[in-house]
Image (spheres, rainbow, N blue to C red):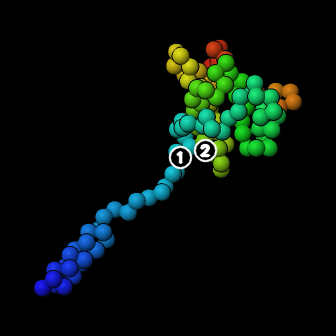
Amino acid sequence: MIKKTLTVAALAAGAVISIAPHASADNTIDTTKYSDATASFVSYDDYQAALDASKNGKLIIVSPYGTRNTIACKGNGQDVAWYDCMQQDPVGWTYLNKSELPVVGTAWVYSTNSDPNA
């Protein structure tokens, strides 16, 4: 009787597991929506990190907040480069302007006068 009970319990558990939805490790980012890109940036005031940014796969942020405040961009930083970036500040969000800087190359610059449609 005990064997029969254990067999039925095992079959019931197997049935529940087989119909339960499987967990998915799909970390796909919608490249047309903003997502947190802060980890992809280094602050311009970390001189060595800024000089090595390109070779380390990082972007440079020129901002009074450095990387302390969240930087959000569209893209995914892999097959779709980060674009249309902005940074959180005490008033809300400020768009970042993509600029070419001498010595370090491409940087995203915080400016209170930034307008993405300009």
Image quadrant holding the C terminus, namely top right
Residue 76 badge: 2
Residue 29 badge: 1
Upstream in the sequence, badge 1 or badge 2? 1
Direction from residue 7 to residue 110 in the image, left or right = right
Direction from residue 54 to residue 87 in the image, left or right = left
Q: Assess whether mark 2 and mark 1 are in contact (beta carbons under 8 angstroms).
A: yes
Q: Against 92, is 34 above or below?
A: below
Q: Looking at the image, which residue sits at the far left? A: 1
Q: Amino acid at mark 2?
A: Asn
Q: Amino acid at mark 1?
A: Ile
On the image, the x and y values in percent for residue 100 come to 80, 28
Q: Mark 2 Cα within 10 Å, few/some/many (few <14, many 20+)?
A: many
On the image, the x and y values in percent for residue 108 come to 70, 28
Residue 15 visible in the displayed image: no
Quarter of the rendering containing residue 104: top right
Q: Secondary structure at mark 1?
A: loop
**Viewer-closest of 18 and 105:** 18
Q: Looking at the image, which residue sits at the far front? A: 2
Quarter of the rendering containing residue 11: bottom left
Quarter of the rendering containing residue 22: bottom left
Q: CA distance from mark 1 to mark 2?
A: 7 Å
Residue pictured at 72% horizontal, 39% vertical: 58
Q: Mark 1 Cα within 10 Å, few/some/many (few <14, many 20+)?
A: few
Residue pictured at 48% horizontal, 57% vertical: 25
Image quadrant holding the N terminus, namely bottom left
On the image, the x and y values in percent for residue 6 come to 20, 79
